[in-house]
Image: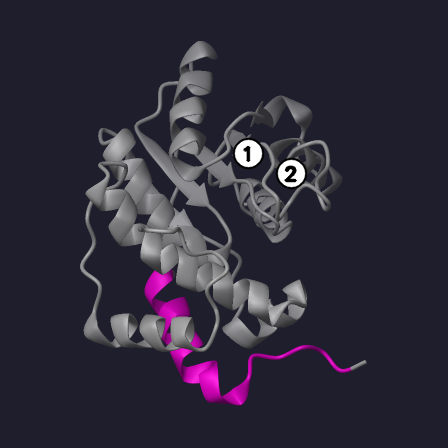
C-alpha cells in the first residue's frame, strides 16, 4: 500500500502553516524540558536524545488523554511518554509525570505546580512538542508562566518525512489548521500572548478550511 501523502494541490498551503508554527530555537542548556503530550511519540524520543546531550537534567512529561490519543496511549500521554523515554535510556529519576492536563494551558499550569512541589527552581525551560505545536505552546507558556525563559524545539524532520511517520496526512493538516485558529482564539480569551498572523498564513489557513480540513476547528458561534 502506498504511503499517504499531502494532496499536491494543498502542499504549498500546508508548508506555509508548517513553517509558521515551527520555532526551532537554537538549543542551549536549560533547567528542565517540558514534553507536551499528544498522539506523536517522537516527542518522547526527541526528549531522550536531548537529555543524552546533557541539555537538561530533568524532563517533565505532561498530558492525560484526548479523543485522538486514547487509542494509542490508553494509560495517558505522559505515562506512555515516560516509558518511551526510559526505553531510550533516560533514567526514571530524571523524569516527572503530570498525568491530568487535558489542554495546553493545563499542561503548563499543572507542570509548574508539579515542579514547585518537587522543589525545582525553573528560570529556563525547553518546550518539546509535535513540530507544529511550537508556536501555540510558546504563546500559552509565556502568558501563564511569564518569568521563565522558554525555548521551543521538536524533532527535526521536514514536512513530508513527518507526515510519512504519522501516516495520516489529513490528521496533520487538520491539526495545523486547528492550531492556527487557536492562536487567535486563545489570545482573545486571555490564555495566550497575542501573535501576528502573516497574510500568507491567513490565506493558506482559509483555503485549507474551504477544502474541508476543519475537523479540529473550535466552533465560534
Q: Position of residue 113 (x, y in %)?
A: 41, 17
Q: Residue furthest bottom?
A: 9
**Magenta span dominant secondary structure:** helix
For the point 38% across and 34% down, the residue is 105
Can the viewer see residue 31 in this picture?
no
- Residue 91 visible to an observer of this rendering: yes
Secondary structure of the residue carrying numbered label 1:
loop
Disc 2: CA contacts within 10 A as few (<14), some (14-19) or many (>=20): many
Task: Kindly identify which residue carries mark 1.
Answer: 63
Question: Toward which corner of the image does residue 127 lie, by quadrant?
Answer: top left
Q: Earlier in the sequence, mark 1 or mark 2?
A: 1
Q: Mark 1 or mark 2: which is in front?
A: 1
What residue is drawn where x is 68% and y is 41%? 70
Can residue 163 be found in the magenta stretch? no
Q: What range is drawn magenta here?
A: 2-21
Report the front residue among 215 and 38.
215
Amino acid at each position: 500500500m502506498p504511503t499517504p501523502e499531502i494532496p499536491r494541490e494543498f502542499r504549498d498551503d500546508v508548508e506555509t502553516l508548517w513553517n509558521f508554527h515551527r520555532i526551532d530555537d537554537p538549543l542551549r542548556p536549560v533547567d528542565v524540558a517540558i514534553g507536551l503530550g499528544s498522539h506523536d511519540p517522537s516527542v518522547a524520543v526527541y526528549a531522550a536524545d536531548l537529555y543524552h546531550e546533557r541539555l537538561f537534567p530533568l524532563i517533565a512529561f505532561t498530558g492525560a488523554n484526548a479523543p485522538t490519543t486514547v487509542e494509542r496511549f490508553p494509560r495517558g500521554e505522559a505515562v506512555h511518554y515516560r516509558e518511551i523515554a526510559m526505553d531510550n535510556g533516560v533514567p526514571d529519576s530524571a523524569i516527572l509525570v503530570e498525568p491530568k492536563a487535558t489542554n495546553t494551558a493545563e499542561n503548563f499550569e499543572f507542570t509548574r505546580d508539579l515542579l514547585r512541589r518537587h522543589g525545582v527552581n525553573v528560570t529556563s525551560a525547553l518546550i518539546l512538542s509535535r513540530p507544529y505545536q511550537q508556536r501555540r505552546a510558546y504563546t500559552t507558556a509565556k502568558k501563564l508562566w511569564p518569568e521563565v525563559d522558554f525555548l521551543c524545539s521538536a524533532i527535526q524532520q521536514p514536512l513530508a518525512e513527518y507526515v510519512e511517520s504519522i501516516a495520516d496526512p489529513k490528521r496533520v493538516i487538520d491539526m495545523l489548521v486547528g492550531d492556527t485558529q487557536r492562536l487567535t482564539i486563545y489570545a482573545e480569551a486571555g490564555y495566550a500572548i497575542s501573535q501576528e498572523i502573516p497574510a500568507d498564513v491567513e490565506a493558506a489557513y482559509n483555503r485549507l478550511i474551504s477544502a474541508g480540513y476543519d475537523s479540529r476547528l473550535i466552533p465560534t458561534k
